[in-house]
Image (cartoon, grey):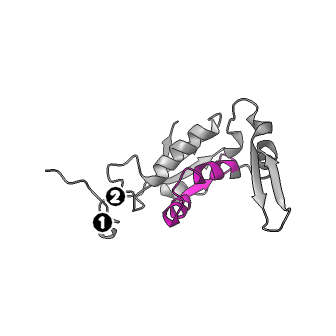
């Protein structure tokens, strides 16, 4: 009988290596980009995937300001922020948020697709998002990933 592989802390440096991937977000729909990136951050694309252990890879997203939204979502999709004080709920449309922080809509979309616990927050740290085409991670020799 074949046993299912489960990663352990002792196997961290030996069994699996963390790869770096670079994704160009130009013209890619936001949801499709976020779901693919979340899968890679979790490590679900690897045969060594273990739900309770972080085996995922690093992802660099470039050209975050050129991500595409279908339909009228640029003006109808809303983002909310609350300060904690009564009556201090702030709402922004996608267009307003992207004009101010072009990398934030991608980060929020990916974050909401990851587990809602310590492990998910640790996975999100492996996501690097840049509004332009340049990134400072050339030394890691990232692998281009097409979506």
- Give left or right: position of 142 versus 33: left
Q: Secondary structure at mark 1?
A: helix
Q: Residue furthest left?
A: 1
Q: Residue at x 67, y 45 (%)?
A: 64
Pointer 2 local density, CA inside 10 Å: few below 14, some 14–19, many at least 20? some
Q: Residue at x 34, y 69 (%)?
A: 9
For residue 134, say whether it is visible: no
Q: Residue furthest top?
A: 71
Q: Residue at x 30, y 70 (%)?
A: 10
Considering only vertical position in the picture, is 107 above or below 119? above
Q: Which residues are magenta?
A: 105-134
Q: Residue furthest front?
A: 86
Q: CA distance from mark 1 to mark 2?
A: 8 Å
Pointer 1 local density, CA inside 10 Å: few below 14, some 14–19, many at least 20? few
Which label was assigned to residue 16?
A: 2
Q: Nearer the viewer, residue 110 or 133?
A: 110
- Give left or right: position of 65 versus 4: right
* Disc 1 + disc 2, Cβ < 8 Å: yes
Q: Residue at x 76, y 58 (%)?
A: 81
Which label was assigned to residue 11?
A: 1
């Amino acid at each position: 009988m074949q046993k299912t592989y489960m990663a352990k802390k002792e196997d961290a440096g030996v069994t699996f290596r963390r790869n770096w991937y670079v994704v160009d977000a130009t013209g890619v729909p936001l949801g499709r980009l976020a779901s693919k990136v979340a899968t890679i951050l979790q490590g679900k694309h690897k045969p060594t995937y273990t739900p309770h252990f972080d085996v995922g890879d690093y992802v660099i997203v470039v050209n975050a300001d050129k991500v595409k939204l279908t339909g009228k979502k640029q003006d109808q999709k809303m983002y909310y922020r609350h300060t904690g004080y009564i009556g201090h709920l702030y709402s922004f449309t996608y267009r307003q948020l992207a004009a101010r922080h072009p990398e934030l809509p991608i980060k929020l979309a990916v974050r909401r697709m990851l587990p809602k616990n310590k492990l998910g927050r640790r996975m999100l740290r492996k996501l690097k998002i840049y509004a332009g085409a340049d990134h400072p991670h050339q030394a890691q020799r990232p692998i281009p990933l097409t979506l």
